[in-house]
Image: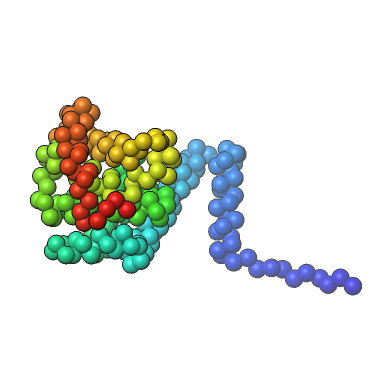
Amino acid sequence: MSSASEPVETTPKEMKRFERWTKSLKYLTGLGMTEDERKQFRDQLDIDMADHQCKQCELWKKNLIKNNPPVRFMIDELEKIGKKVTADDFKCMPCDETRAGGFSPEEGVLLCQNRLPSKSRQEETMVHEMVHMYDDHKFNVNWTDLSHHACSEIRAASLSGDCRWTNELRRGFYTFTKQHQACVKRRAVLSVQQNPHCKSKEEAERAVNSVFESCFADTRPFDEIY
């Protein structure tokens, strides 16, 4: 004997999910949606994505500061030279496609929430920018001097894990000899090129080459390249 089925109540959350699915289908097919509605849908997607990226960046930031050995090491070493670092020194914000992070002596560390696809990439970026912070506090770096800037970029690229062979393979760069040095030099040149006081790629290359050997050999505060 079959029993009559009772109506199933739909929760507001399920209704919202269904409405979003319907809109997504209309957007993909182009059916049943005006151009204004398509634009509104795209704008809302951008807002939702930015909100998700920000929350993810903040979550990873807190976890890395609490539990990640390289991040913890840099925070401890900065404190040893009189620079106390807290979560407030790291700001998650959207950026253009030319960077994953940044450092300013006045503002602290920028974490580009839309350019950090994984927790490991965020770890590397936080360590990279803290190397700049360490250099700025310990060596009083003049960031308008391209040779000063180049030295810090060489150290940051070398010590942060940015030039691990897995990262280079993903970028399409890999050599069997001196891969790490080649990556560090290339990444440093790219960063120095973004300095407002740098006029050309050639000028950035000259600055990096002029300090490369001494700055690459300087692994402070690490004992060695990890």
The answer to whether 91 is drawn above or below residue 205 in the figure is: below
Task: Pick whichever, 93 or 213, lies toward us.
Answer: 213
Q: Farthest right residue?
A: 1
Q: Farthest front residue?
A: 177
**Colour scheme in use:** rainbow
Q: Quadrant of the N terminus?
A: bottom right
| Residue drawn at the location 21% of the way across and 62% of the way down | 77
Q: Position of residue 151 (x, y in %)?
A: 18, 42
| Residue drawn at the location 39% of the way across and 54% of the way down | 120
Number of marks: 0
| Residue drawn at the location 37% of the way across and 56% of the way down | 57
Task: Pick whichever, 139 or 38, lies toward us.
Answer: 139
Q: Is residue 155 visible?
A: yes
Answer left or right for 3 relative to 60. right
Image quadrant in which you'd find residue 172: top left
Answer left or right for 166 relative to 73. right
Q: Position of residue 177 (x, y in %)?
A: 36, 36
Q: Position of residue 150 (x, y in %)?
A: 19, 40
The answer to whether 109 is drawn above or below residue 149 in the figure is: below
Image quadrant in which you'd find residue 27: top right
| Residue drawn at the location 20% of the way across and 35% of the way down | 208
The answer to whether 2 is drawn above or below residue 35 in the figure is: below
Q: Is residue 151 visible?
A: no
Q: Position of residue 64 (x, y in %)?
A: 35, 62
